[in-house]
Amino acid sequence: MRAEWDVAKYLRSGRLELVLEDYETPSADIYAVYLEKLNLSAKVSHFIDHLRDYLGHHVDAPNKKEKIW
C-alpha cells in the first residue's frame, strides 16, 4: 500500500495497475510538527511555506489534471 502521489507516474505509464478501485486507503498527509513556542517564528513560517510550495510543484497525482493540495 502506497500513497497515490507516490506511484502516480507508474499508474499513468501502465507499469502498475490499480486494483480494488473501490477500496480507500488511509490518507497520507504530510504534517509539519514544531514546538509551540516556535509557532510564530519567521524561520519556521518561511520553511513551512517553502515546503508547501515545493511539494505543490513536485508531488505527482495519478491523473495529471488532479490537484494534490
Image (cartoon, rainbow, N blue to C red):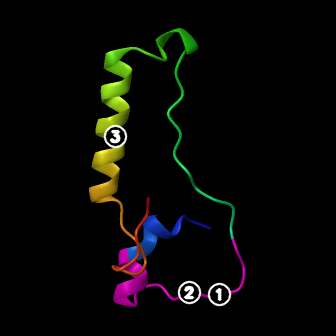
Q: Is residue 30 left or right of residue 56?
A: right
Q: Secondary structure at mark 3?
A: helix
The residue furthest right is: 23
| Residue 54 percent across, percent down from the top left | 28, 47
Gap in Å between the C-alphas at discs 3 and 1?
Answer: 30 Å
Q: Are marks 3 and 1 in contact (CB under 8 Å)?
A: no
Gap in Å between the C-alphas at discs 2 and 1?
Answer: 6 Å
Q: Is residue 25 left or right of residue 18?
A: right
Return the residue at label 2. 18
Q: Nearer the viewer, residue 54 or 15?
A: 54
Q: Residue at x 52, y 21 (%)?
A: 34
The picture quadrant where one finds residue 64 is bottom left
Q: Residue at x 35, y 80 (%)?
A: 65
Earlier residue among tags 2 and 3 = 2
Q: Work out which quarter of the rendered image holds the N terminus and state it.
A: bottom right
Return the residue at label 3. 51
Earlier residue among tags 3 and 1 = 1
Specify start and end residues of the magenta stretch as a single range: 9-24
- Above or below, 12 relative to 25: below
Q: Residue at x 44, y 71 (%)?
A: 7
| Residue 19 percent across, percent down from the top left | 63, 88
Q: Is residue 29 left or right of residue 64?
A: right
Q: Is residue 34 magenta?
A: no
| Residue 9 percent across, percent down from the top left | 35, 76
